[in-house]
Structures are given as C-alpha cells and as structure tokens.
Amino acid sequence: MSKHTPSRSEFLTIRGLRCHVRHWGRDGAPKLFMMHGWMDVGASFQFVADALQGDWHVIAPDWRGFGLSQRSGLDTYWFPDYLADLDAILRHYSPEQAVYLLGHSMGGNIVGLYAGARPERIRKLINLEGAGLKGAKPEQAPGRYAKWMDSLLEQPEMRGYPTQAAVAARLQKTNPRLSDDKAAFLAQHWSARNDAGEWEILGDPVHKQAGPLPYHVDDVMACWQAITAPVLWVEADQTNMWDWMGGKPAGRAELDRRLGHLRDVTRKMVYDAGHMLHHDQPQALAQMIEEFLAS
C-alpha cells in the first residue's frame, strides 16, 4: 500500500453533539477546510492530502451523523443544521481570518449556501460537484410531506457486511475506478463493527430518508449571488450528478445557468473521473486546488 500523509483525530462539541475532525499537516500552516459529501467521511480526502505539494493544514470534519461524529438521535436531519455546524467549526479553528473552504457534493451544496450567508468568512471557495438538486414544484409538496411522514413509521437500517474486505468490495462495485489499496483504506474509515459483529457503514441510516422540505433553487441562487469570494467549480467528465438534476441535457443547461449566478468563477474539468473525483484523480484535483489558491 502506498505511504499516506499521517493524520490525527480531534473531537469537539459542536452545538451539543460530539464532532470528529481529521487533520493533516502542521498546525501553523495555512488552513484548508475540506467538507465531505453524503455517506462519506472526512478521511475520504486522504488521497488529496497526499497529493498536495504545499505546506497546508488540512481540516476535514465528519458532518453530524456521519463517520465518527455523533448522531443526532432524531428522526430527521435538517439541512440548515449543517450550515450552523460549519459556522461553529470555522469559529473554533479560524475565529478572525477568512478561510479557504472546499466542499464535495452535499458538502459543496453546504459551503455554497454558507459562503452566501457569511461572505466575509470566505477567502476562496472550492465546490466539487455541489450543484444541487432538481428544483421542486409546488404541486409536489403534499406528496412529499406524506412520503416523509410514512418514512417515519419505518426503522431505517444499514446493511451489515461480514468483513471489512466485503465493505471494500462494495465500494469498488459503486466506483470501479477504486484501486484495491484505496478501497481497503476507505473501508477502514467508512465502516465499523456493529453489535451483531458485522461491518456497517458509518452513517446514520436516518440520512437515507427523504426530508419533507422542497429544494428551492431560487433561494440557493440568491446565496450563490451573495458570494464575494472567488469560486473554483470542479466537475468530473464521467460524473453522475445529472441523476439529481433531471438528466444530462437538461441538467447541463441548468448547471450552466446556476454557475452564471457566481460573480467570480473558474470552471475546471477532471478527466477519467466520476463523481468521487477526490478518489479517482486526487493528483489532478490537488494541482487544480493549489493553482487556484495561489492565483
């Protein structure tokens, strides 16, 4: 297995929940915050941390209910909580200085909203495929509320795997580009033994349930328009993000429309990569990040 940049773990109490934060690099180095996506963990940025050439202090929390961070104990996760958690994390690590902030997928959605709500806190923003969802229509609301209430009557569960190697195989099934050593590394951080002795993905199964609130594109775009920091938008040539945006032709046009709301955006494409571009092409991604932060 290739040698990895060593990381260290820290636990903070954030808004009443125990939050796990992973660090790479030395404490005095410039800080770069990396926020993971849905059903992912902060350790997932290991390969990017390995590929960075400069002197950085990378800080990657696990969102509430993911990885080693505490689960809320509630039956629903509310999206604005992620913004408030991020605000608390940034106040803890960088109370005075504006920050370099990166988010992937769900994390990209969160940092985009946050950077509009707190523009003065962001020095530069990097969004890895956090394009958002297809916009909701008002007539979908009754069914959405009903579906949510129905889901609360069921107890969601995570599937168990007999071994950590089986978890790695599952990750490779989802992403065939993952090498054996990367899959084995990720399986260590994505899973843990449950009470039945099986290996279970470290994500609260409640995350799998659809929430009741519609996705209001206009609200999101108002936040994007309020961003004052330069933005680096990165996407993968083999991405499946169109699945969440209504299919490729319509999704491509809608993505271009959304990116048009950003005042200062640099757009980059990572080739031979899927949605998990930080796993597939960490060297190319790290180079783009460092070039953008140096510019």
Image (cartoon, helix red, strand yellow):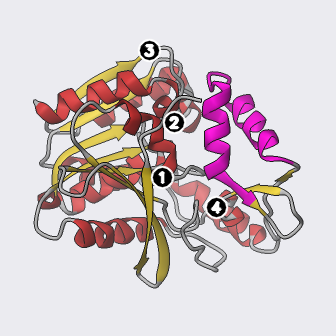
Identity of the residue furthest to the bottom in this view: 16
Identity of the residue furthest to the top in this view: 272
Residue type at mark 4?
His
Between the residue at mark 4 and the residue at mark 1, the CA separation in whole angstroms equals: 17 Å
**Disc 1, disc 2: CB below 8 Å?**
no
- For the point 26% across and 52% down, the residue is 26
Q: Earlier in the sequence, mark 1 or mark 2?
A: 1
Q: Is the residue 69 above or below the residue 208 in the image?
A: below
Q: Position of residue 117 (x, y in %)?
A: 23, 62
For mark 3, what is the residue?
271
| Magenta highlight range | 163-192
Q: Position of residue 31 (x, y in %)?
A: 22, 52
Left or right, residue 148 beside residue 226:
right
For mark 1, what is the residue?
42
Q: Nearer the viewer, residue 89 or 2?
A: 2
Between the residue at mark 2 and the residue at mark 3, the CA separation in whole angstroms equals: 21 Å
Between the residue at mark 1 and the residue at mark 3, the CA separation in whole angstroms equals: 23 Å
For mark 4, what is the residue?
207
Between the residue at mark 1 and the residue at mark 2, the CA separation in whole angstroms equals: 25 Å
- For the point 75% across and 73% down, the residue is 152
Within the magenta stretch, is there residue 161? no
Q: Nearer the viewer, residue 16 or 224?
A: 16
10 Å crowding of disc 4: few (<14), some (14-19), many (20+): some
State the mark number for residue 175: none
> Of the residues tagged 1 and 2, which is closer to the observer?
1
> Of the residues tagged 1 and 3, which is closer to the observer?
1
State the mark number for residue 245: 2
Q: Earlier in the sequence, mark 2 or mark 3?
A: 2
